[in-house]
Image: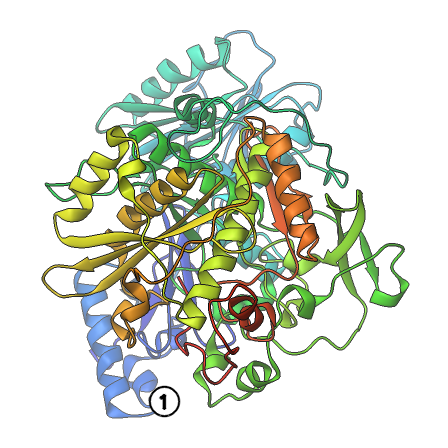
Amino acid sequence: MRDTILRWQQNYHVTKLPNNNLIVLNADGEFLFEEKSFPLLHLIDGHKTCREIVQLAKCDEQANRFLSICEYFLSNQLYITDCTGDKILEKPRTLNKLSENIYSDLDIPADGIGLPSSNIQLVISDTLIAANFYAKNLRHLNPDHPVCLIATTDTKLMISPVLSTFSELKIFDNTLKSNKPVLKLLEAYTDSCVAMSTDIQLSTSLKDNHINRIKEILLPHLNGQEQQKVLIEHTYKEGITNKHSYQPITATDIIEQVYLQSRPVAFDSDGGSRCISAEQTVERLRPFISPIVGQITHIEALPSANQSTISIFKTAFFKSLPVKDINNVNNNSFVQVSLGKGVSQAQSMASALCESIERKNAQFRNIIPSLLAHKSSLPHRSYSFHQLTPYSNHQYAKFADSADTESKRTQAVIKFDDEQINWQQTWSLSQNEPVYLPYVLCFANTPYEEDKYGKWHSNGCAAGNNIEEAIMQGLFELIERDAVAIWWYNQLPRPSFDLSSLDTNYLEPLHQTISANHEYWVLDLTIDTGVSVMAAIGKNKSTSGWVFGFGCHLKPELAAQRALTELCQLIPIRDQNGAPFDFDAIEKEDFLIPNSNSSALCPKLEPSGDLKLDILAVVEQLKGLGMETLVLDYSQEPIPIKTAKVFVPGLCHIWPQLGNQRLYSTPVKLGLRDEPLNENTINQQGLYI
């Protein structure tokens, strides 16, 4: 084998990154080969022999691993091929006019796909992205006539919606590439179009039965009422046809001023305060679920234990990385999973779907920052990085020390030096005026280098059936994390919450699910923010391993119920690989157990039945503590769910931000400690849940 010359199979596009990692993709998938696990693969070029490649290895182990991987790939006909003695003759792909209004780069008989008298133009290739590229660059197309794109291989057929204008072609291309984030990154990295092809094996002509099938599916699609709203996917062998709803995202301007409207609460028995049912929310979001053209890839239930009556649903979405982060990509970089929580199946589904929309909408999508400026020259008030993420000097020093494990965290940043940066205007609900925040704290995966001063995180991000729902849920999350942080880092003993006050219709399935393998209880963590916060604590009956769930609501019973549903959500994934928090590393345990000598702090606020009034009450309570509530509405049309990121500078985060004095002073202020702890005496285990 050492004299074998290897090359990549022709249907793969291979890109070598500066760190010698490889991104390998074709129309059917994307693969990352990290040099650490796949050494020397970046040297495969169709010219070097294996002997020449292994001579460049740093050690025998690296050389042997390379040879072993290559032998496995060759024997299974994966990725690479033996080209010793071959002359690679790649037949160039050219687009041909088959007949009036039909173009293709595949070998299709001229009379193969006939159209009835129609002004719809067809462009056919082996991928929709390739067909779209041709359509956008084909001068012979009539710009006044609509276009339909067709992708066909030996196994699969895809037919696009009918696209009426060049602008619609561009939007469709953006939609496809949003769900091909690796391709999107590579095109930005190489500043060129990346051609993808499948191993279609159409050396002579498209099979007659495939042509007949295309005609059978295409003609009703072109004549149907949903021709502009549906993408069709068909597998030839199985004969299965799926219709994907096409709901393109339009360019959306940020709504910088937020007006609250009266929103009566109709549903608050499971999952929070909502104006429409969970079932309605799920149905509204179904058209946006598709791995090809959707905002959410899929929804599925996690496998549950036999004793569990609680369903945990999982969704996911694709996210695109900026070119500046290309050396940091890994196999988890492009897909983000969301889990839903709720007692009912519908609530868990709605929760998972809404969390994906909440996170997906927060991804950078060429939304122009409000201003590029120095802080001192802004026309309105602003908050800078340290006010929003108050790290201590000691933390900054650890972030800067490459030998310290803290420097490897995603959260590691440097101190802001007041340089010119991008700012995003938000709206103060406390003062009814605009306030500027650093843009990179408002959106994820931006191309701006200033994220070295601070990183976007999802704390305070929320989704709702209207903007008021989203803001309320965002406030609940911030208040929950604040109370949990003060409890965790100060290791405060807290009393239990009486679960007998919960509705038995909801408590019973929660109890049945959790108690199968865990002892459990709920601690009341409510503090001066005036809203009930609860921690559900589980202890495994066999291993004594801990697991937590948290909840916040204006109704104490709902806060406890939300904590228990989150506990159900976290139990199945407690020990997943790569989890940032190690429950088994917990040392001091007494503050996790109910303390009968501690008294609960009564919540100061009660639900009014109207979300607007509830929001204003919470904003006023926080204002009394010297804190301002800011809102960024980052909703995307035509998604029927609204999304908001709420900021309350001064509240604590569960991730350690140890320069926040509230973390140390609040327990003393509330009479829970006689003396404040300090950065060296607080709980040293960061709560990275």
Left or right of 109 on screen, residue 175: right
Please say whether residue 267 is visible from this viewpoint: yes
Circle 1: is it few (<14), some (14-19), or many (20+) Cα within 10 Å?
few
Question: Does residue 4 lie above or below 180 as drawn?
Answer: below
Q: State the residue in front, 386 or 163.
A: 386
Q: State the residue in front, 503 or 361.
A: 503
In what quadrant of the picture does the C terminus appear?
A: bottom left
Residue 69, percent from left and from top: 23, 72
Which colour assignment does the render follow? rainbow
Q: State the residue in front, 520 or 286.
A: 520
Residue 288, percent from left and from top: 47, 30
Please say whether residue 173 is visible from this viewpoint: no
For the point 49% across and 75% down, which residue is it?
A: 674
For the point 59% across and 64% down, which residue is it?
A: 455
Residue 593, percent from left and from top: 27, 63
Q: Give, as a three-letter code, the residue at label 1.
A: Leu
Question: Does residue 132 lie above or below 208 as drawn?
Answer: below
Q: Secondary structure at mark 1?
A: loop
Question: Does residue 229 lie above or below 314 as drawn?
Answer: above
Left or right of 96 on screen, residue 387: right
Residue topped by disc 1: 56
In what quadrant of the picture does the N terminus appear?
A: bottom left
Residue 56, percent from left and from top: 36, 89
For the point 48% across and 85% down, which residue is it?
A: 680
The number of numbered discs placed on residues in the rendered structure image is: 1
Most extreme residue toward the bottom is 59
